[in-house]
Image (spheres, helix red, strand yellow):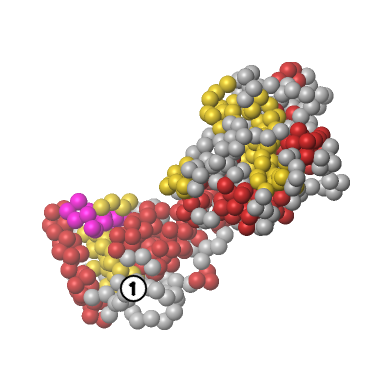
Amino acid sequence: MYGRKVRSQNIAQMVAESGAGWQAKEIGRDFYRLDSRQRRVLVIGAEASRTVTTVGWLDEWPNLTDFDVVIINLPSLDRATLVRLSRLDKHRLVNMRDELFDLMMSKGEIYCIMAPFMAFGSYLYFGDGSMEPEWSNLKWSPIGFSFTEIRGETVLVEGEVKFEDYLRQVSGWECYLNSTAGLNYIEERLRRDQKLGPEEEVLWQNLPLATNRYGKPLAASLCFGVRHRESGSERMKIRFISDCLHLLPPPTKISLEQGIDLLIEEAKGIPAKTIAPDWSDLYHIPGEEQVEQKIEEMEKRIKSSEREQKRLFQAYRKLQRGKSLLFEHGENLKRVTTEVLQRMGFSVRPYASSPGLLVVQTRYGKILLDTAGRSGPSQPGDLQLLLQHAVFAQEEDGRIWKGILIFNHYRLEDPSQKQSAAFPAEVAVQAREMRLGLVTADGLYAAYCMVLRGSMLREELEERLYREAGIIHLPAIEPNHLPSCPGFMPPRLIME
């Protein structure tokens, strides 16, 4: 974030010179004090935690000013998330900046784990010549800070400082903080809230927490305030100081999630737990190996159960596809008819001379199968293609071919309800004369269910399909008697 560059002030020195009556130590380290009550902590951009409230960048947020500490996981705001945020909620980061300003003014703290700067969109220009990108991953910050991206490994943490346990887990860094700040937003808000008079000016402070070998801050606490010059005096007197925005590098010795846990403990005033060193794995507590073995056994059982569950789900989906006979048409009806017949044990393949037809092999001979579906009864023209190819196949093969039309009275309503007949009388008469068979899709579905239950043999269905002409009467569909328990079905039909 870019803004007007203001030299960092030494607050402790200014307070001492201003005669404000405050102790320098209290001003410089005011953020160390913890309230006696349990502090409320919010983490933005991290996995769910049992101890504090967590939200994602695209989630619905609570009121940020209602918390004592807001922890920002900036590495989780990657470019893809930032672009989505700009499209879904273009005011999110601006509103976030307003609420974080109020948080700092009400003695609330911000912990930010830093990430490389990124921005896109047009730039906003200010009267002093500074500018700010329309969208950046630092748009949320009330104080406009910037950093220089350069890699290093030396981290110096001197004395007792805030976040000491966290900073001990940092052994490498990607940037250091610059000693400049953009205060355009701070000045605008203070004037709008009538907290900045005409004779007053904004100041800011950069309190280093860790540095590299040449003194550049790798972690720092930033705050701002207002000072004024009293009449008849050359000294500047500080009127108030905000709480701090703490900027921290991401940890390198531990995971980012473990680093956030350390910050949560810091925010709540809980003594941080020491991270176990690698050599501690050489020591074992009695009973540890037995528990590890049980955990390993349970993991194997879980994986086995997951494989079995996947297999059953696949079998379940295959069974469910049979219901498509009740409402499909076109190519989908042909596809589900093929699958249903194959699951009952029939050999089905496309007809070479006309791929739109199917060839079903039976003990008695070959059946040439056509499928059709329409919102209305069948018509005599539906039989012409089937008859033509049945006669042609018989002449070519020298054997009798049975032709069957499976027709779905393309149903938008329950097929068990009373509807017009699928095959009018003229179609049924013509089919008998041509020795063709007529089968309704719901009749085939009912026969399929009976074969699965074991109440009809596949051989019985096979004989009906081949021997009968005209309308082939199959069991009527009965919604209340569909197979509900796979345990009564042949295992081969369940799992195929």
The amino acid marked with disc number 1 is His
Q: Quadrant of residue 210?
A: top right
Q: Residue at x 74, y 39 (%)?
A: 235
Viewer-proximal residue among 393 and 483: 483
Can residue 357 be seen here? The reply is yes
Can residue 47 be seen here? The reply is no
SS state under label 1: loop
Viewer-proximal residue among 208 and 307: 208
Viewer-proximal residue among 20 and 413: 20
Q: Main secondary structure of the magenta part?
A: strand
Residue located beneath label 1 in the image: 409
Please provide percent x and percent y for residue 458. Answer: 40, 58
Going by the image, does 315 lie left or right of 284? Answer: left
Q: Residue at x 81, y 40 (%)?
A: 19
Residue 114, placed above or below residue 474:
above
Residue 144 in magenta stretch: no
Please provide percent x and percent y for residue 44. Answer: 63, 46
Please provide percent x and percent y for residue 358. Answer: 26, 56
Please provide percent x and percent y for residue 103. Answer: 70, 50
What segment carries the magenta color?
351-366
Residue 458, placed above or below residue 252:
below
The outermost residue toward the right is 36
Q: Residue at x 22, y 54 (%)?
A: 355
Residue 353 in magenta stretch: yes
Going by the image, does 259 lie left or right of 22? Answer: left
Q: Residue at x 38, y 73 (%)?
A: 411
Q: Quadrant of residue 222?
A: top right
Is the residue marked by circle 1 packed among few (<14), some (14-19), or many (20+) residues within 10 Å? many
Residue 8, placed above or below residue 154:
below
Query: Number of marks in the image?
Result: 1
Q: Quadrant of residue 440?
A: bottom left
Viewer-proximal residue among 356 and 106: 106
